[in-house]
Amino acid sequence: MTAVGPAGAADPAGAVGPRRADALRRFSFNQATAQHWPLPEVVAGCVEAGVPGIGLWREPVAAHGLARAAGLVRDAGLAVTSLCRGGFFTADDWRDDNLRAVEEAAALGAPVLVLVSGGLPPGSRDVDDARRRVADAIAELAPHAAAAGVTLAIEPLHPMFCADRCVVSTLGQALDIAERFDPGVVGVVVDAYHVWWDDTVYAQIARAGARIAAFQVCDWVTPLPEGVLLGRALPGDGCIELRRLREAVDAAGYTGPVEVEVFSAEVWARPGREVLDASLAGYLRHVA
Amino acid sequence: MTAVGPAGAADPAGAVGPRRADALRRFSFNQATAQHWPLPEVVAGCVEAGVPGIGLWREPVAAHGLARAAGLVRDAGLAVTSLCRGGFFTADDWRDDNLRAVEEAAALGAPVLVLVSGGLPPGSRDVDDARRRVADAIAELAPHAAAAGVTLAIEPLHPMFCADRCVVSTLGQALDIAERFDPGVVGVVVDAYHVWWDDTVYAQIARAGARIAAFQVCDWVTPLPEGVLLGRALPGDGCIELRRLREAVDAAGYTGPVEVEVFSAEVWARPGREVLDASLAGYLRHVA
């Protein structure tokens, strides 16, 4: 495979030196992409591969110990680009859990806490009410995030998750909420997998501008598996115009990290380092 | 189960007489809901249950013979409310196949031919180009539909089908295409399953007005099955505000049939008459 990165590196896994460092400058590896790779090994693998940033998840961080995890990534010189995730505001315990999530992001030095809003409450058909509850919860959470120096990033999830996971289904909807707040406090996540199908996505990315707090990539393949959660693909293996979306967020003023985040039973079955190398190759060829 | 229909029928399967006829006036049974019920039996079942309308599919009609099928439903006194389906405009043979679909709709007396646009061509990532091809194809097909007295009804499918089945993902997009034509020639389908998640759907229904050529209902349940096609539920068994959507299409001026159309492996495994009765009960209780 010949990578087509800005530095023209021939093989992203083999290229070395300043050109490679430049090509990977914005790359961040979301640890969920190698779901079963233990945190110390992910961190070591990223360092070895010259990856500058990592996206963390609360569960493996908690399993490792928050302070220990923070020290681990700090000592490795890795930037924590985001923490996944807060949200699920339609659950009863949303308040305490989200306050903890903000604290955890701050402790890890993560500038961004990703929020997945939650779906309809059990038995409910009132999607409008669920959406109001999400906006109200974010309003309540925002001062705490501001005090902690953490940006809340509302992530619209693909509409196929509206009922059970996230009633915020489009970038436009996420912006309708985010725009009520200071851009440093509440922003949005642009995740290619969730928004690529939307014929208004490029207009909404332009509208988002400085609200873009995170940009994530993976790819869309069919058939979707049962439950539709674990059917994503590595960048380049599906039908999403990833580079076009990356260029659009750049044109909107976004200069932050590009996180590769893949939920895939097939990818998760592979060794962590192999997944990281494949993520780097896909990023350089199809996104950078 | 106590049905709550406008006529106050206690049991839709048991109620008889003028009140029942009035309650079912707009009900249409899409034959795909009882996928394995042979056409003559569907027709007989509808007549027996006092159902005034039926939605047909091209494959079972062809299997029975077009002229024979047309005679069967006509002799039974059933109105054919729609024919599914034309479209798949990104396939090479779209032209001939859609011209035949228009002729079949006319032969059956179906006022509406439902169009499912088709997904991305194999290997393509260019969703914009696919959408242009859909609009171009409809422009080419429209004069033939007008001559045959058949309304082409563009059906937006849920965005989870964008890649492989239908690049028209929202009612707004469908209207953007339809509005280039005479409302009697090109309209839209409002299918609750495909549009319920959209926070702009009520505004788009109001915009649609006389463009609404068909209204279909079923319900959303999770988890979605592999391939996501056969995971729908009977009206009332899921989380969609079906009555609110029905009232919205009515408020937009729609007075046509309400088709129950359910793709479900579980429903398809049940006897046809049982499925029809459950559809009637769900319609009276949750839609009418």
Image: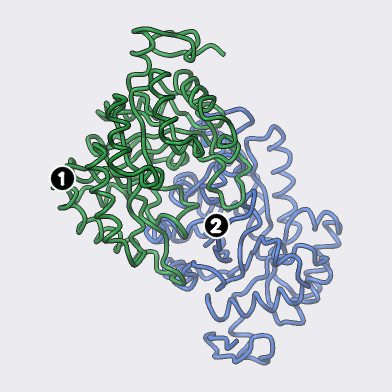
Chain colours: A green, B blue
> In the rendered image, which residue does mark 2 sit on?
B189
Q: Which mark is residue A218?
A: none
Chain bearing tag 2 is: B
- Residue B122: x %, y % from top left: 64, 30
Whether residue B217 appears in this view of the structure is yes
At 57% from the left edge and 64% from the top edge, which residue is drawn?
A: B216
Give the number of the mark in front: 2 or 1: 1
Chain bearing tag 1 is: A
Please name the amino acid that badge 2 sits on.
Val
Assign a secondary structure to mark 1.
loop
Relative to residue A48, is residue B47 depicted above or below? Answer: below
State the image quarter where residue A167 is shown. Answer: bottom left
Assign a secondary structure to mark 2.
strand
The mark total stands at: 2
At 19% from the left edge and 48% from the top edge, which residue is drawn?
A: A145
Number of other residues with Cα within 10 Å of mark 1, as a class: few under 14, some 14 to 19, many 20 or more: few
- Residue A247: x %, y % from top left: 36, 25
Pick whichever, B87 or B280, lies toward us.
Answer: B280
Residues marked 2 and 1 touching at CB (< 8 Å): no
